[in-house]
Amino acid sequence: MNIKRVGNVILAVKDIDKSIAFYHDVIGLPIKNQRRSWVDLGTSGGALLSLHPASLTAQHIGSSIENGITIGFLVGDVQSAVEELKTKGVRIYRDVVERDAGKNAIVLDPDDYLISLFEPNFEDKSQQTAGYQGFTPA
């Protein structure tokens, strides 16, 4: 096997329209491809976040917290990102904390998936390896 990179992360969602509104309108991810039962969101060169209605495959059971799923986004300024999301009614799971690698906050999407917002302290802001250590919900 010769894996080149992560292609996409697929989320089974209860209400695809609510999830599109959250990830596209609130978070700001561009829509790359959209069909009624599948939506790809993301930026060029990165992995895509794909939304799929859970009802088409299996019952949606449990939250991100129970299932251990966290989606991480690198941001330029985590504090302003959290403030903006608060004004849009996004639920904050954990407000901004500062660690050696950078600042982090965790918000919840419409299905209670955990969304980690990470502002790295690295000179090269695109550097991500090992940056999430200590940035999980626990």
Image (cartoon, grey):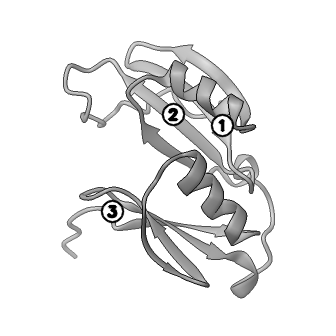
Q: Nearer the viewer, residue 47 or 42?
A: 42
Q: Nearer the viewer, residue 54 or 69?
A: 54
CA neighbours of label 1 inside 10 A, class few (<14), some (14 to 19), many (20+): many
Which numbered disc, 3 or 1, marks the residue that appears first in the sequence? 3
CA neighbours of label 3 inside 10 A, class few (<14), some (14 to 19), many (20+): few
CA neighbours of label 2 inside 10 A, class few (<14), some (14 to 19), many (20+): many
Name the residue carrying label 2.
Answer: 117
Q: Amino acid at mark 3?
A: Val
Q: Nearer the viewer, residue 135 or 42?
A: 42
Which numbered disc, 2 or 1, marks the residue that appears first in the sequence? 1
**Residue visible at 68% across and 49% down in the picture:** 109
**Residue visible at 41% across and 66% down in the picture:** 8
Q: Mark 3: which secondary structure?
A: loop
Q: Quadrant of residue 102?
A: top left
Is 130 on the left-hand or right-hand side of 72? left
Name the residue carrying label 1.
Answer: 107
Height in image: 62 above or below 118? Answer: below
Tell me where residue 33 appears, x and y as whole percent. Answer: 43, 76
How far separated are the C-alphas under marks 2 and 3? 19 Å
**Residue visible at 19% across and 26% down in the picture:** 124
Which numbered disc, 2 or 3, marks the residue that appears first in the sequence? 3
Height in image: 48 above or below 71? Answer: below
Q: Mark 2: which secondary structure?
A: strand
Q: Amino acid at mark 1?
A: Val
Discs 2, 1 touching: Cβ within 8 Å: yes
Numbered circle sitting on residue 6: 3
Q: Quadrant of residue 107?
A: top right
Q: Nearer the viewer, mark 2 or mark 3?
A: 2
Is 102 on the left-hand or right-hand side of 79? left
Q: Mark 1: which secondary structure?
A: strand
Viewport quadrant of the C terminus: top right
